[in-house]
Amino acid sequence: MIDYRTLPVRLNPVPHSERMTPTEIRASTGLAAIFGLRMLGMFLILPVFAIYAVTLPGGDNHAMVGLALGIYGLTQAMLQLPFGMASDRFGRKPVIYFGLALFVLGSLVAASAQDIYWVIAGRAIQGAGAISAAITALLADLTREEHRTKAMAVIGSTIGLTFAASMAISPALYQVIGVPGMFMLTGVLALLAIVVVAKWVPDPGVSHFHSDAEVASGRLKDVLKHPQLLRLDFGIFALHAAQMAMFTVIPLALKSTGSLPETEHWKVYLPIMLLAFALMVPAIIVGEKRARLKQVFVVAVSLLLATQLMLVGLINHFWGIVAMLLTFFIAFNILEASLPSLISKIAPPQAKGTAMGVYNTAQALGLFVGGVVGGLLAHTLGAYAVFAFGAFLSSIWLWLAISMEAPLAVKTRMFHLEPLDETRAMEMKQQLAALAGVADVAVSAEECAAYLKVSMAGWDEEQALKIIQGEM
């Protein structure tokens, strides 16, 4: 594998006609598949687990059901940043193999569980295979800067499609193989994922740190003190807490209010997911292309809040639940797609990877808190309290969203550089920062790369290339 840091800068580092190399395509598709398989293990049981759990000893306690759903997020939140840092020291693939092996073990434990407590143990072990950061770092090793955003988009799309497919196929799989079979299936798929990593994903010739894709411990303090980023971190926490809390009660409510067997719940989820996805696309286009991302964002959070409030009163009405599931997933899809874009626009160029690492940790913590609190509220107060909890989080988020600064209409551009010292890096940074259309810039002598936030409406790229090539 070529170490791109040793290559001279291209005359046009990001030509629109240039395609990804076969190596980059293999890396992107292979690692997207690994992400998708792991997400399948988390998502697949959501629509049916609360129904299955009541058949297990201890499963009649909603608090235990919520813990079983959410514990995955806790161990993932605790370990994904350490796993990412370990991949810098021990290598990307060894850490990924170890994480996938843990996931397989957890799947087997959960599949063979005879009570809710062993399911909880299995889910905790599954979450401990927290390889997201290591996968992202490997992807950065295997892709050039100009194609990294495209590669990450492949992974993001795969996760979204995996979630939608899980909602639709889970009830049908439940009829055929049951929840233990689903756990076994995800374990087998994780074993296949190990083969994919070994045989399909290329080996990086050289692994090094990428500030746009990895967490820098030295940047954590700045990211954790950034008020705009913290708003977004709370947002992803609240979104996934509300989602996980919902699924402690929604499957049982669909079954009881509509006399609809759990094996036929796909008739509800499939059209909802398709319609929610179709309605998400124009909203994201308006937000990104017309620089109205904050407005779209606030509307989506408002819709999330309205959904939670309405479910407090509609949880005993089948068609009301169906309607609110549709509005929830419309809001959910818009927010899931727009939040990473907002992180990218707001985070300092040299801290983008760190900002995303904190964001992903907040997401995992949301899964944990949502499952635990949702289960506890359902057990002690009833289903309506679960949605009151979601409404409480959503109302705080709405206030934070309204008061946030509108993000600049910028995009990130990255350039390879010839080896340079710190003095030249500082000079180049000052020259690039002075160009029209450049909102922020970071030049890393260690990474031999320049990261720029530039205007969506156009910027002086020709002058930037002259500076990078040493012609100015």
Image (cartoon, rainbow, N blue to C red):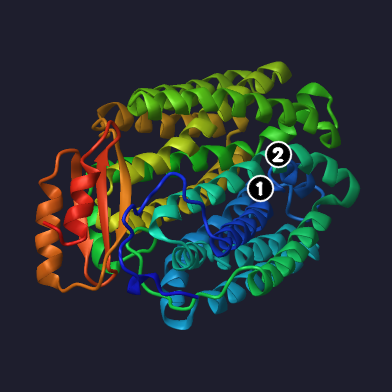
- Compare residues 133 and 120 and report the one nearer the observer: 133
Residue 25 location (% of width, % of height): 58, 58
**Mark 1 / mark 2, whichever is N-terminal:** 1
Q: Is residue 78 left or right of residue 175?
A: left
Give residue 401's mark: none
Q: Secondary structure at mark 1?
A: helix
Q: Secondary structure at mark 2?
A: helix
**Residue extending furthest toward the right:** 176
- Compare residues 65 and 212 and report the one nearer the observer: 212
Q: To which residue does mark 1 refer?
A: 43
Q: To which residue does mark 2 refer?
A: 167
Residue 235 location (% of width, % of height): 40, 39
Residue 48 sits above or below residue 291 on the image: below
Quadrant where the image shows the C terminus: bottom left
Q: What residue is rendered at 66% in x and 46% in y?
A: 162
Q: Is residue 87 left or right of residue 123?
A: left
Q: What residue type is disc 2 on?
A: Met
Q: What residue is rendered at 35% in x and 54% in y?
A: 13
Crowd rating for badge 2 (residues with CA inside 10 Å; few <14, some 14–19, many 20+): many
- Residue 321 visible in the picture: yes
The reply to whether callout 1 and callout 2 are in contact (CB within 8 Å) is yes
- Distance in Å between CA atoms under marks 1 and 2: 7 Å
Q: What residue type is disc 1 on?
A: Phe
Residue 143 location (% of width, % of height): 47, 62
